[in-house]
Every structure is written in structure tokens, then in C-alpha cells.
Image (cartoon, coloured by chain):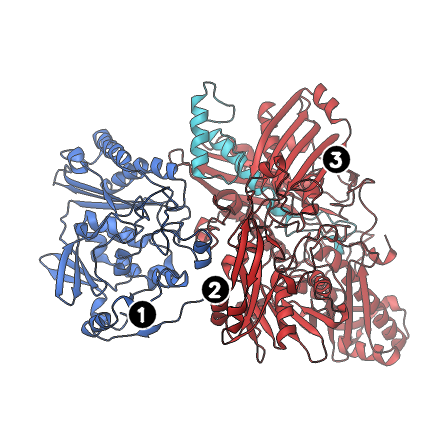
Amino acid sequence: MLRLPKFEVRTPESLDAALALLAEFGPDARVIAGGTDLVPNMKHELVTPRIVVSLARIPELRGVGDAGAGWLRLGAMTSLADVAADARVRAQAPALAQAAGLVAGPQLRTMGTLGGNVLLDTRCQWYNQTYFWREALGFCLKKDGTLCHVVEGGSKCVAAASNDTAPALMTLRAELVFVGPQGRRVTPIDDLWLADGAANKKCASDELLVEVRLPPTGPGHRGAYGKLRERASIDFPLLGVATRIELDARGTITDADVVLTALQARPVRVKRAAELLLGVRAEGDAFLAAARAVADQAHRQAHPMPNIPGDAEWRRAMVPVYVRRTLEAAARGAGPVHAV
Amino acid sequence: MIVESLDPEGPYGAKEAGEGPLHPSLPALSNAVFDAVGIRLRELPFTPAKVLKALAEKNARSTPLAGGRV
Amino acid sequence: MAARDQHGIGAPWGDAAAGDPANRAFQVVGKPHRKIDGLAKATGRAQYADDLVLPGMLHAKTLRSPHAHAMIVAIDASKAKALPGVHAVITGADLPIKYGVIPWTQDEHALALDKVRFIGDEVAAVAAIDEDTANAALKLIRVEYEPLHAFLDPRESLARPEPKIHEESKTGNVSKHVDLAFGDVDAALASAEVVVEGDYVFHGTTHAAIEPHCAVAQFSAEGRLTVWSSTQITHYVHRALAKVLELPIQKIRVVQPALGGAFGGKSDPFSLEFCVAKLAMFTGRPVKMLYTREEVFYCHRGRHPMKLRYRTAASKDGKIDAVDAKILIDGGSYSSFGLVTTYYSGQLLTGPYHFPTYRFDSTRVFTNKPPCGPKRGHGSVQPRFAFEVQLDELAEKLALDPIELRRRNFQGDFTRTVNGQRITSNGFLACLDEVERASGWRARRAKLGRGRGLGVAGSMYISGTNYPVYPNKMPQAGIQLAVERSGRVTVFTGSNDIGQGSNSMVAYVVAEELGMDVADIRVVAADTDLVPVDLGAYSSRVTFMVGNATIDAARKLRTQIAGAVAKEWQIDAARVRMGNGKVFDLDSTERCITTAEAFQIAEARCDTLGATGSYNTPTLGGDYRGGTIGASPAYSFTAHVVEASVDVETGRITCHKVWIAHDCGRALNPMLVAGQMEGSAYMGIAEALLEDHGVNRFGLHAGPSLLDYRIPTSVDTPELRR
């Protein structure tokens, strides 16, 4: 069995105590939520913190609640299984419930948290490997080396954003609440991302993500998530598609949004989705034509690289298929789009 | 479906059972794909990318294959 | 065949000659039974190699090559040796003797001596107080390499003889070449009414057994070595240890603890077995080594990638005239079982269909990749895939139903194949009938609508082979039985229970023969200090050979016990019956004693009770070089129908159902047979759709983990109907 490098666990019982530990140990400390991303990465010696700060004993970080004015608050430590099963989330944010329900497999969703999934490290087949494996080819520019094995001569890491919940939260215009030495900061999730696979999030090491907030949605809200992967469980996305459609009382689209993930370092919004779908009734041939137009636009924007497993050309060919299918699923109030 | 041919030299007539039943799975799957969509998968593994490529090649041919119905 | 090997097929007390098709006379055989170790495994009590903890035990780790092909210029382990907690570091110079499972092609070193041949090849091993210290020491070993050209494509290995991956190869980078022809294939092809031809590709796959390889060694003060290893062939490990360590073989004991799956991946002697032994000898302390999952992918010995070209000639009514094959086999970096693989790639295709003429030309080459070896269906899954697809193409060309085509070419039973193999019982037609009926083939094939279809294929496989890996005239399977007057019998067997249930099988046989409860049978297995030799769990030989040896021993014992009881009762021995834990007089059933009482009568009248039994194959095979490889005392036959659908937009195949019919002669325990049928079909579909043991452009395994090497989860598994 792969050994975990030695480390010390701290289990603060309040947010302030956790922040104090992060301030004290700086880059030597890492936060552990469910551990489903951090622990394998530690075994691969991708991160080797001296101190691991567990958030398990801070109860206010867990659970789904009312945040006022129709907003929902989801504690960062809420398990993905709980997010997927929560009746309010399923009603108000179906794309998020579907996405959370398709992360990894049942055991991992019970351990893994929403906050952990939002802050998931980027993934690459040349990076998510053991020390021996990475050393054998001289490491890579995301960790310990200077070469990119995906893009010859590349100087910018292209490891892929691989979190299923992120694109769903982007279509929902979610806000993230961080707490740090300077106090609370609330940021739209759209502003979290950097187009750099080495570090694709604007988040300081002494900050904690404590909460995800979802704005209210009305009765005309529709959303769905589509996930491409090789098996029907466990695997990370080869492509993730989140869709959102807003309908008026007559079933005509008043707003729409489509966000893709697992293609590049950050989740990508499909351009002109709302424009192409606006004023179309969410059924029949007209809707299908509009959905195809969005799918074509997504295809033009998508340029998968051999960064994560799966044939890159096939992943690109799947972009319009999954965008169209996921839009259709949203329009029908169905989803997720997923094999099995 | 266990078929018992009672071999004269096996213990009580028994023969092998642990490896033989693996073999036909792969070609039978390829042959089922032919019955389904008229393409011959001759290269393993049957990844979706290979299936799409074979479908595209089949569609590019003018005469449809017997057996295929797409 | 010796008289001792012929046991008939009937129940011990049944009248086989008169025919008892329902075999009502069987008491244990043919009925579902739990495995004798099932409860221990289900409750976590079974002891696997890694569960073994000995006082003062050290932990060992292996340093592996980061180069696909390179000379070792120098190794400096001084810093590693100086690390506190490190007890010993060994390198190739400490274990310079070659080994390999096939005596003619021994090309492996426990640790690389002068060169490394794939990324992951073993270079040095460290024993330390714990795994972390051993790992830290590995990082302190400095190895200077001089890289050589790395061969990653078997076509290049064939075309380019230099640099040689193995200096001792006679022909460049060719590992083995077999070219055999039976009948005039060219004439048959030239005059045939129909010829189909095509190229087929089988990628590599690995076993992915749940338990990683593990070995523990202890060297006693008296100079005796004990190695506990997760091996499926104790006997070959025993021999290899003696050779490499230069110890008298009788001073070595090899024990196989409970095993968490093997599928062929634990058939070779592995580096770790020699390393823990040598480290235990150096340090005087017990040493354990457990491979990581990543290391299991490197040591591999999985299914060979093959490029296959087939031509099949037939008449218009679908009768095969000729089959012609040319096969290129990617062996990876060592020989392993490759000599056998190369023969098997051709020798095992000659059933269940009649080939009037047949030719195959198979070449195994070395590449700088993890070494290939035997995986479930060794050497024959790849050609079977190609040929059964080609048969479907023939059916298409002739507008014949694919099942009908297969029926028309059925070879029959009690016949001989074109390459000289003896076929005895053959239930292939019944297998075809079963899957045709169960799948609703006639009503449903070609009628399932857009994107959904049915496919059929057949196969045959060996029940062991009469080719013992090293030539000798001794039995291939031996059994000893010890009887205790309490009514308990202990079976001593050299066979390896790798989860397939061989320990249970020998218990069922003894219970059947002596009319005992299975719970009163103990099994001591796979411990070379205690048991007679058996050649191990490979080639599907165990039930057939060890089963026969067990019947042989149990019948001797039965004769002795029944004779003693008959004398005690002053009746004819034919009247003494044993069943349900009782021994009684058939003509006067109120005269009835327990098995234990019968044992006591026999012990008093005869001697301390025990018996031995054995099995050896009859003379088999064709009269030509290699004619015995693949020659089996009996062949199993199988037919499958698969139902699948294709999403034409995504290219994704969904395998919905597999109907499996298998001729296993007689199911000694139908529940275990069904488990093997399910497990086999699961593994086949997994290889077809997901698994790929590939390397990247550096020759490095593309994803040596169970995240990246994808085996189907429960939700990916088709419905398996058997």
C-alpha cells in the first residue's frame, strides 16, 4: 500500500481556532474536509503538509439552511451525498443536486464535501501519479518540474478543472463565503477562477471557504447536469455540462446559461447561450434548433487536450452532444445526463 | 446454463470451468455490435472513439452492409 | 494411462455402468455447498500473507528503474545503508543467478544485474524497521544508468535486432517463433468457394486481483528458510528459491496463505520472494514485502497484446476448409510463460469446430514494457476473439445464421483435432442450444430495432495440460489422507486455493467417497513441508487432476475401511456402505455404526490409517515438436450470446446481458461453477470495453492505479445469465 507521508492532525473546534492554526503554520498547513482529494494527493507526494487542519469538529460548517430572502446557505462541510439528497437543493438548484450526486461513488460522496469539491485540485494524467512515476519522466511544471508533457514546450499548466459542482454553481450564480485574517469576503463563484492549471483558484492559504450561497430561483427555473465518464461510477468527469433555463409562465425561455468543465484549467461558460435560447419555447423543433446552436457554439469553444484520460478528440466530439442533451434534460425538468 | 457432458476421464466426469467461459464474451460482444449497428469491431478495446470512427466509415460507404440496420 | 488414474464418472456407491443420469447416488457432488473457507473470508478472519506479523520482522521495499531500457553503470547504496533503521540493502550482485518459470527460457534476475528492461524493473531492495524507513532509504540509493534505445512497438522489435533486449536471444529481439501447418492450407485456400480475411488487434490487459503480491521470509538458526507468499504455484517458487539462493531444496519451505485472487498473475516466481529470502538470510530477522498497487501493475504478467491476421476458407454451405493465422505477440521485457503463450496462440483454436487444414505462424517479441504472462484463458483469448469475429463475418458473407454456421462446423465428440489433440466429451452443441433458447435468438436477432443487437461466440479450453513445466515422470498431482479415530479426515494437498475453491473441492470428494459430512474434513494445502507435490493452480488443471488424485486416495481408504468393517461383521465387503456419517450393512440396515466407529474398527484391525493418491496425464498430443503443449486430458466447451446496444451519437456500447452456457463435464459444486462462469464473463466484457494495460510514449505505464485502470463497477456490469 502507498504510505502517507508523516503529518500532524489538528482538530480545532471553532472557526477562529482553525484560522489561527492556518495563520500560525502558513504554507506548512493544509485543510482537510472529507479528505477524498487531499489524502490521495498526499500519498502521491503532490502535497506534503506538516500540519493537517481538520474541519470535522466545527458544526456550523455543516448543513443546508435558509439564508434569508429566498437564498440557501450550504455549509462548506456539507457532504456531497447530503447536497444531492436535500429537498430544498433539489427544488431550487436541480443542476447542483444532480452534479453532487454524480461525484465519484457513493462512499466517496459520503465523505467528500461541497467545499472540498469546489476547491478540488486540478487534474492531469501526468500529475496525479506517484512520486516514482513522476520522477521517472522528470516531473512536470505543475509539481517539482519545468516541463509540460501535455503541450510540448508549454509554459503554462493545463491541468483540468475536474469538479462537478463548479459548473452547476456557476449557472446558479452562487456566491462563496470565505473567512480569513481580514474577516469575511463574499465572492461570486465566477470570480474564483484563474486560467492556470498549477493554481486555478483565487484563494489564499490562510482563508477558509465556509459557505456556498444560492440565490432564489422561481417556478420557471430548470437546470440539469451532464457528465461524461468511462464508468458509471467513481471516475472524474471527462466532460461536465451544467445548464440552466428560466421560463416564463407560458414556457418561453427568458434566460439561459451553460457552463462546461474538465476541458481546461477553469470551467468555461458557453458564449451567447442566453441569446440563442431567448424567446424560444422550451419544447419542440424550435427549441431543438436553438439547443443545437448552443451546442455548436460550445463545440467551437472547446479544445480538449490530452491532459486527463480519454481520447481528446472524442471528448471534443462529445461537447455538442452533451450540451444539447443536457439542455433538453433541463427543458423536460429531467436529468442528469449520464450513462446508467 | 451448466451443460454436463460427463467426461470419462474427469473426476466424476468433471472438466474445466474457471477460464473457458471467459473467451466468447469479447467476440460475442463484437458480433452483437454488428447486429446492432452494422459495424465490425476488430480492435480491442471497443472504445466509444473507435465505435464512432467505424460508424462514420460505414456511413461514408454507399452500400449498406447486410445485418446492419442503421 | 495408469490404472490408478482411471476412476470412472459414477458416484462411489452408484451403478455407473447401469446408468444413473440423475446421479441420485451422489451425496455431496452435484449439490451446492459453501466453500469451506467462505465464512472465514466473509468475516475477515482469513489470514492473508500481509496479515502475517512475526517478532522482529523487518519491512522491505524495492527500488525500480525509471528507464525503459538502460545499462546499469554503477549503484551506490552507501547512504541508504547508513540511514538509521536500515538493516540491509541488496542489489543484483547479491542474487546473480537467473530464473524463469520455463526452464528453457530463464532470463530474469531478482534484481537487475547489468541492465534494466522496463520502467519498474527491480534494481535494489532495502530491509528496514518499517516501510517508511525503507522508502526513505530507496531515495538515497544512487544509480547511474546509460540509456539504450527503448522498444515500445512489437513491430519495431521484429524489424530491428539491435540493441538486443536480451543478449542471449538467438534472433534479435524475437522471444519465440512457432510455425506449424497441418494439411495443405494453401491448396484449400486456392480452391475455396469463399475466403474471409482480416486483421484483428488485442490490446494488453492485466489481472487486477484485489490482493497485491506479498511475501514474508524467515531464516531459522538451523539454516532453514520459510517463505510465505501470495503465489498460485508453491512448487515452482520452491524450486526457483533453491536455484537462486543456492540452498538445498529440502531446507526451504514455501507456504501459500489465504490468497486474494490471482487469475494467472501470481504464477511466476517474483522478485519479492527472492528479495525477502535473501534479506532474511542477511539480517537473521523475518522480512516482509508487500507490493503497492502500482508495483502490481509493473510486475504484470498479464494478457499479451497481439496483432492477428486470419484467413478462413469455406464452402458455400459454410463448412470450413482452412484456417490460416499470422500472429505478432508483444511479450514485454521477459520470457515468463511466453514459450507456452506462443504455442497456445495457435494450438488451442482447433475446437469446437472441425478444421480440415490449419496453419499458424506466431512470433513473440520482446519490448521494453512490463512483462506479459498468463492471464485467465492464457494465450487463447486473443486468437479466439479474432477467429470468432471472423466466423461471424463468414456467416454474414454466406447469409447464414451465425449459430447455424457454428453448428455446421461442430467437430463432434471423441475425435481428434487437426493438430493431433484428443477430444473426449464435447457438449458444445448443447451449449449453443441453451444460449439460443435462453436469449430468444431466433425471434430477436436482427429484430431488436435500431442500435440493439445479439451476438454469439463459442470456445473451448483445456483442463490442465500434459506438459509439465519441467520434464519428469512423477505424478502431476499427489494427495495424502490422514485419518483420526475421532472421525476426522485430513487432506494434504499441494494445490493452491486461489479463491476458486480447490480446498473445498478436495473436501467434497473425500466426503463423497467416505460418506462423511464436509465439516469433518480438514484441508492442509500448499505448504511444501507438509504436503505432496502438486503443480499448482494454472491451466485449469486443479479440479481435474487433483480431483482425480483425491478420488484415488479416498477409494484406497474406503476399500481398507469397508474391508475391516466387513471382517468385523463377517459379511461381504460389497455390503458395507458409507453415507451421512454412518457405516451400515446394505442387507441389514439396522446394523449401523458411525464413521468414527468404523475408523476405530479399521485402525484396530489394520494399522494407523492413511492413504495416498495421485494423477498423471495419459500420453497425449501430436507427434511433432510442441505437440504436447496444449494437449489436455479433456476440453471444456462454452457458448455465449451477448445483447448490446450502441449509442450512435456517443459511440458508447452498453452490454446489457450475457447468456453463458458452459460444458464443465459435471459440476462438482454447481454454485462454484456458476461463480466461475459469471466471473469469467465479467472479466471478458471488462477487457472488451474498459481495461487497457498500455504505456505512454516514455514506456511508462499510462495509469498504474485502479482509478486509471478501469475495471467495471457493479453498475457497469451486465446482467449475467447462467
Using the image, determine if residue C331 lies above or below residue A215.
above
Using the image, determine if residue C155 lies above or below residue C518.
above
Relative to A258, C455 lies left or right = right
Describe the element under mark 1 as helix, strand or loop.
strand
CA neighbours of label 1 inside 10 A, class few (<14), some (14 to 19), many (20+): many
Depth check, mark 2 against mark 1: the one in front is 2
Relative to C340, B37 lies left or right = left
Relative to A158, C347 lies left or right = right
Which chain's residue wears label 1? A
Quadrant in the picture for residue C62: bottom right
User: Which residue is at 31% across, 39% downward?
Assistant: A322
Instruction: Give how far across and how far down residue A158 sits, in percent.
Output: 32, 46
- In the rendered image of the structure, the colour used to display chain B is cyan
CA neighbours of label 2 inside 10 A, class few (<14), some (14 to 19), many (20+): few
Residue C450 visible in the shown view? no
Residue type of the residue flagged with mark 1: Val
Describe the element under mark 2 as helix, strand or loop.
loop
First in sequence: mark 2 vs mark 3: 2
Front-most of residues A86 and C309: C309
CA neighbours of label 3 inside 10 A, class few (<14), some (14 to 19), many (20+): some
Instruction: Give how far across and how far down residue C89 sits, in percent.
Output: 57, 69
Q: Which mark is residue C180?
A: 3
Instruction: Give how far across and how far down residue C30 sits, in percent.
Output: 68, 57
In the picture of the structure, the residue carrying the numbered disc 2 is C139
Residue type of the residue flagged with mark 3: Leu
User: Which residue is at 49% across, 49% downward?
Assistant: C700
Using the image, determine if residue C36 lies above or below residue A193.
below
Q: Which mark is residue A52?
A: 1
